[in-house]
Image (tube, rainbow, N blue to C red):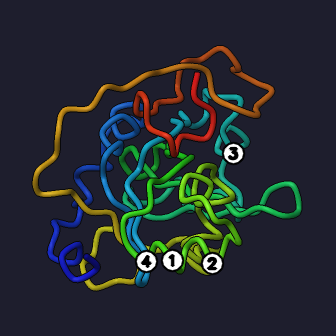
Amino acid sequence: MEEKIRNWEVLPREFYARPSVEVARDLLGKVIVHGSTAGRIVEVEAYLGLKDGAAHASRGLTPRTKVIFGPPGHAYVYFIYGMYECLDLVAEPEGSPGCVLIRALEPVAGIKLMMRRRGVIRIEETASGPGKLTVAMAITRKQNGADVTIAGRPLTVRRMPDEEPLRVISGPRVGIRKAVDWPLRFYLAGNPHVSRPR
């Protein structure tokens, strides 16, 4: 399976150089590959930059947020609550900060390794949350700023060759205190790997 996935098309930079909400919805069903592990994206949240009080970029350009203000198609990895690392993918044209938080994955390659890293026995618990999926895939702040649009790099996002139509549900984002009612969380209906199905 790993070798098969590596032949799938890597999403180009143009895919990410669009409004964050469009990128977020279109990332559903795509596959994140890191090393020997891979997971299908089943849940995301869009963050809209300066006008979005819940977005890191709303505070302006800082050493922490400079990746979000840079070219699209890069990873933004940050540390929260003193214990979790989260993976975002930078969207919007350069200079217009926006990103997509990857909230949950469905493991598709390196599954035993992912489960061992997480210390779980049920596959559904492996990557069903933003902090869980980074542990499962060994994604850390070392990947902050990584260009995910270049084939051959350790961290990429790929398109499955035979994508099926998806039923997408939207709702409010999770665990934020500002812009709490904005329906910017998107997930695949009925998928058991989603962090918080509604």
* The furthest residue to the front: 121
Gap in angstroms between the C-alphas marked 4 and 1: 6 Å
- Name the image quarter holding the C terminus: top right
Q: Quadrant of the N terminus?
A: bottom left
Q: Which residue is mark 4?
A: 110
- The span from disc 2 to disc 4 (Cα, nearest Å) is 10 Å
The amino acid at mark 3 is His
| Residue, disc 2 | 116
At 31% from the left edge and 25% from the top edge, which residue is drawn? 167
Name the residue type under label 2. Answer: Arg
The residue drawn where x is 57% and y is 37% is 49
Q: From the image, tell me which residue sits under label 1.
A: 112
Quote the CA–CA distance across marks 3 and 4.
Answer: 32 Å
User: Do the residues bearing badges 1 and 2 touch, measured as CB atoms within 8 Å?
Assistant: yes
N-terminal-most mark, 2 or 3: 3
Disc 2 and disc 4 in contact, CB within 8 angstroms: no
Where disc 2 sits, the SS reads helix
Quickly name the residue at label 3: 56
Q: Position of residue 81 (x, y in %)?
A: 87, 55
In the picture, measured across the screen, residue 190 lies left or right of residue 88, that is left
Of the residues shown, which amino acid type is indicated by label 1? Answer: Lys
Mark 3, Cα crowd under 10 Å, few <14 / some 14-19 / many 20+, is many
How far apart are labels 1 and 3 at the CA level? Answer: 34 Å
Foreground tag (4 vs 1): 1
Crowd band around label 2 with a 10 angstrom C-alpha radius: few (<14), some (14–19), many (20+): few
Left-right relation of 163 to 64: left
| Circle 3 SS class | helix
Q: Position of residue 56 (x, y in %)?
A: 69, 45
